[in-house]
C-alpha cells in the first residue's frame, strides 16, 4: 500500500550538516555559498562559544574551524569536541591563516584530519569536504 507523498517547503533533513566556525562573517558566507551549492546543509557560528551552544543540540557531519578567534579558539574548541563521547568521531578541518609547521602539528595532534591555510581555496575545500562527508544520491 502506497502512502501519499507529503509536500513540504522545508529543506530536506537528509543533507549532511556541517558546522563552520569563523569570526569573519565574509569567510562564513563564502563557505556557505559553496557548500550549499554542493548539497550540504550548513550551520555557522562566529565564535567558539556560539559553536558550543549549537553543538549541545546537534552532531554535525563535519566541523570547519578557524584557529584564531576571541574567547574559545579553534584549537580549544577542537580539544573540547574530541573529549566529548558524542562528538569525538566528527571530522575536523582547520581553516586558518596560521600556517607554520608548529601550527600544522598542533592541529593534527588535537585530532584534525585536514589543516588548510587561508586564503581560502574554495575548490580545494569543497573537494576535501566531499571526501570526508559523501552526499547520498
Image: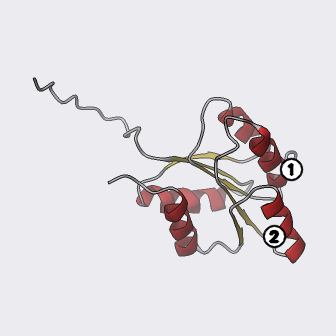
The percent coordinates of residue 96 (x first, y second) are: 75, 66
Q: Is residue 54 above or below residue 72?
A: above
Tell which circle, 2 or 1, labels the residue nearer the N-terminal end: 1
Dividing the image into 4 quarters, which one contains the N terminus?
top left
Q: Is residue 59 above or below residue 28?
A: above
Hey, which quadrant is residue 71 in on the image? top right
The percent coordinates of residue 23 (x first, y second) are: 75, 54
The percent coordinates of residue 51 (x first, y second) are: 71, 41
Lateral position of residue 99 relative to residue 29, left or right: right
Hey, which quadrant is residue 117 in on the image? bottom right
Hey, which quadrant is residue 45 in on the image? top right
**Residue topped by disc 1:** 70
Lateral position of residue 95 relative to residue 58, left or right: right
**Residue topped by disc 2:** 104
Q: Which mark is residue 125?
A: none
Label 1 environment density (alpha carbons within 10 Å; few <14, some 14–19, many ≥20)? few
Secondary structure category for the residue under label 1: loop
Residue at 78%, 63% (x, y): give it.
108
Secondary structure category for the residue under label 2: helix
Decide: marks 2, 1 in contact (CB < 8 A)?
no
How far is mark 2 from mark 1, CA to CA? 20 Å
The percent coordinates of residue 85 (x first, y second) are: 71, 35
Colour scheme in use: secondary structure
Front position in the image: 41 or 27: 41
Amino acid at each position: 500500500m502506497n502512502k501519499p507523498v507529503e509536500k513540504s517547503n522545508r529543506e530536506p533533513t537528509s543533507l549532511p550538516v556541517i558546522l563552520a566556525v569563523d569570526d569573519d562573517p565574509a569567510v562564513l558566507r563564502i563557505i556557505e555559498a559553496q557548500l550549499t551549492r554542493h548539497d550540504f546543509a550548513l550551520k555557522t557560528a562566529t565564535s567558539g562559544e556560539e559553536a558550543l551552544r549549537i553543538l549541545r543540540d546537534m552532531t554535525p557531519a563535519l566541523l570547519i574551524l578557524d584557529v584564531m578567534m576571541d574567547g574559545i579558539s579553534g584549537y580549544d574548541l577542537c580539544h573540547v569536541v574530541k573529549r566529548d563521547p558524542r562528538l569525538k568521531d566528527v571530522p575536523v578541518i582547520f581553516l586558518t591563516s596560521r600556517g607554520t609547521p608548529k601550527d600544522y602539528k598542533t592541529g593534527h595532534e588535537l585530532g584534525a584530519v585536514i589543516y588548510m591555510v587561508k586564503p581560502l581555496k574554495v575548490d580545494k575545500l569543497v573537494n576535501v569536504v566531499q571526501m570526508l562527508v559523501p552526499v547520498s544520491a
